[in-house]
Amino acid sequence: MAPLLLAVPATVNPAQAFGRLEHRPAHCRVVVGGRSLACERLQISANGSRGLRLRFIGDDQETGGSYQLSFVSLDGDQGSPLSCDNSGCRVNSRRWSATLLSTSWIRFDARSLPATRMAQGRCWIDANTVSCESHSRNVAGISAEAQL
């Protein structure tokens, strides 16, 4: 006779954020390799495991393509800045900072491949501004800033 397996769903810690905030900021700018680009959207995603992805998305008028600049960080000492429920996510902290784990620069113009790198840097929220800065060996610094 085969043994009986009992499956019990894992409980979710309600203090951990899981979800995504999508925002169209009035002001959004990224700087990659010394080149400044305007961005149209900011996404802040939490996966419930203390990780947070801040993604700045825009169009590159020079190449006719689009881009995504992502920063991945830990929640930080203060926990996640997101508060999510069935109706969506919102920023619940106007003072937050965290150490950066990696950056990813993706251009969608058939001339570039995605580039993801381990990086040093920080992301932070100060009042109504979301900012990230990163630098890694032999690669120009990358930064982004958007208004909430």
Image (cartoon, helix red, strand yellow):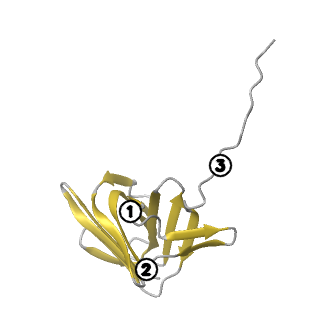
Neighbours of disc 3 within 10 Å: few (<14), some (14-19), many (20+): few
Question: Would residue 14 appear left or right of 107 to someone viewing this image?
Answer: right
Neighbours of disc 2 within 10 Å: few (<14), some (14-19), many (20+): some
Q: Residue at x 30, y 66 (%)?
A: 122
Q: Nearer the viewer, mark 2 or mark 3?
A: 3
Q: Is residue 65 above or below residue 148?
A: above
Residue contact between numbered discs 2 and 1, judged by CB atoms under 8 Å = no
Sequence-first tag of 1 and 3: 3
Mark number displayed over residue 11 = 3
Residue lying at the far left in this picture: please name it: 138
Sequence-first tag of 2 and 3: 3
Sequence-first tag of 2 and 1: 1
Separation of marks 2 and 1 at Cα, in angstroms: 14 Å
Question: Would residue 34 appear left or right of 43 to someone viewing this image?
Answer: left
| Closer to us: 126 or 134 | 126
Task: Give the secondary structure at mark 1.
Answer: loop
Query: Residue flagged by tag 1: what amino acid is it?
Result: Gly
Q: Is residue 99 above or below residue 11?
A: below
Question: Would residue 11 appear left or right of 56 to someone viewing this image?
Answer: right
Query: Residue flagged by tag 3: what amino acid is it?
Result: Thr
Disc 2 designates what residue? Answer: 94
Query: Residue flagged by tag 2: what amino acid is it?
Result: Arg
Residue contact between numbered discs 1 and 3, judged by CB atoms under 8 Å = no
Mark number displayed over residue 76 = 1
| Closer to us: 40 or 47 | 47
